[in-house]
Amino acid sequence: MTDLTWIDLVLVLVIASLVALGANRRLIGLFVGVGALLLMRPLLSLGQGNPWFSIAVAFVCGLALALLARKLVAPGKGPELVFKIAGGFGGLLLGSAMVLALVTSLPIERPASNPGVIYYPPRTVGARLHGALEKSPLVTLGKSILLHPLLADAEGSPQAQRVLSSLHTWLVVGEPWFER
């Protein structure tokens, strides 16, 4: 069993917080979670050109999703437990997507002395942080997703390879290992 690092605990806390928030907001949480999942890939593509504009668009889209959900869902109507579970599921989707986006978006380090070598996570972040990132199972998953085309011959079941390939297609824009 792989030990969790403090990085993993923070990332799991992000997911748990969004599950709780989604459950609290009930169907609005489900609506926002699914909407955010659908908007993530276009926002990642937009972020390649101008990250600040992408953040502003994401904020506006999130606000629009919440307001639209509030208009569509009558508060206090319907089975509360079912709606809380649905909202929690929306929060789980959103939290998982955010964590996957975070663990696949760390900088790639390419040493000038040997440009054919890639370090992910980067070694230039400081010893303590690098140690935690290097040991983190979630960051290792992010590395497998990010570098999937380069690691396609890695061991694993065909189903796991298909999942990694799909996540790579959804979360990774272009070929960041070629960028300088």
Image: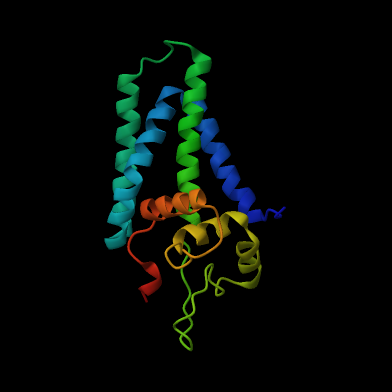
- Can you say whether 26 is above or below 134 in the image? above
Which corner quadrant holds the C terminus? bottom left
Q: Nearer the viewer, residue 66 or 160?
A: 160
Residue in the picture at 49% in, 52% down:
158
Q: Nearer the viewer, residue 61 or 123?
A: 123
Does residue 131 appear to the left or right of 118 in the view shown?
Answer: right
The answer to whether residue 178 shows anywhere in this view is: yes
Q: Position of residue 73 (x, y in %)?
A: 35, 18
The image quadrant of residue 7 is bottom right
Name the residue furthest bottom.
113
x then y, percent, for residue 164: 46, 53
Q: Position of residue 129 (x, y in %)?
A: 62, 65
| Residue 151 higher or lower than 55, as above or below | below
* Residue 104 in view of the camera: no
Q: Residue at x 57, y 49 (%)?
A: 11
Q: Looking at the image, which residue is at 68% across and 53% down?
A: 4
Q: Is residue 115 above or below residue 107?
A: below
Judge left or right: residue 121 versus residue 132: left
Location of residue 142 in the rendering, given as x and y in whole percent from the top left corner? 51, 57
